[in-house]
Amino acid sequence: MDMSEKTMDSTTTLMKQKTENSPLSSAAYEDLVREMLVRLGEDPAREGLVRTPERVAKAMEFLTKGYHEDPREILNDALFTVDYDEMVIVKDIEMFSMCEHHMLPFFGKVHIAYIPNGKVIGLSKLPRLVELFSRRLQVQERMTRQIAEAIEEMIQPQGVGVVIEARHLCMMMRGVEKQHSAAVTSAMLGVFRDIDTRTEFLSLIRQRAPNGF
């Protein structure tokens, strides 16, 4: 079993586990939030906090909905046979996720490129793929690799490149408190490991057209 198959199988297992035994679907999660408020020295019965447990439960359900989604279901109905073998790039995809170490947000932009090998993915599905993997507790490095491997498995292109640029609130509002630091991660598969292809990709995602795109 190759790395991409392991990633997809792991995704399916996580999805089943979350669906079968999700604390977000019961009042128990709201009780946990109330307990946390008490431990912080707050009064969960005061006006501004009465509905906070319910709101937090709903927010967490939304922010972790990627556990319930399968990349194959998103991409399967948007694969098209084409006679095209040049680089396809979708850049500046907005991304919001949560760090698995502190459960604080990190956010930024994702740039995806691949060179087709007979099939392409509908362009709108690449942001959907980013959304799926970002709506989980994540580390940026792993998410970068997961996006690339999902594309590699679905269309077996000549190569895939993914770059993520993100700012992490666990660095900005706690810890070292560095407000202007950004983390950049990349995953280069197939022909994107070649220095010329990699350089072309990195150059293209830095370019800005006169109209701002």
Image (cartoon, grey):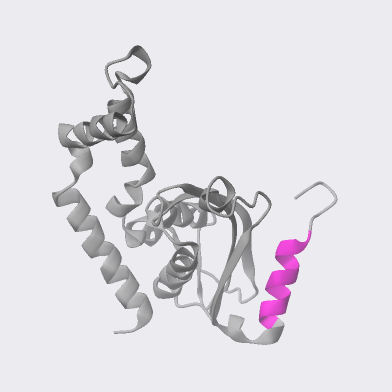
Query: How many numbered circles are shown?
Result: 0
Occupied quadrant, residue 3? bottom left
Q: Check the image and name the residue furthest to the right.
A: 210
Q: Nearer the viewer, residue 69 or 182?
A: 182
Occupied quadrant, residue 100? bottom left
Q: Check the image and name the residue furthest to the top.
A: 47
| Residue 33 falls left or right of residue 101 | left
Q: Check the image and name the residue furthest to the left.
A: 20
Q: Answer whether residue 190 is magenta in the image.
A: no
In percent of width and height, residue 123 lies at: 54, 56
Q: Height in image: 20 above or below 118?
A: above
Q: Check the image and name the residue furthest to the front.
A: 41
| Residue 107 falls left or right of residue 134 | right
Which quadrant is the N terminus positioned in?
bottom left
Q: Height in image: 134 above or below 12?
A: above
Q: Answer whether residue 200 is magenta in the image.
A: yes
Magenta: predominant secondary structure element?
Answer: helix
**Magenta-highlighted residues:** 197-207
Instruction: State whether residue 112 appears in this view.
Output: no
Q: Nearer the viewer, residue 93 or 139?
A: 139
The residue shown at (31%, 30%) is 37
The residue shown at (50%, 57%) is 126
Instruction: State whether residue 22 appears in this view.
Output: yes
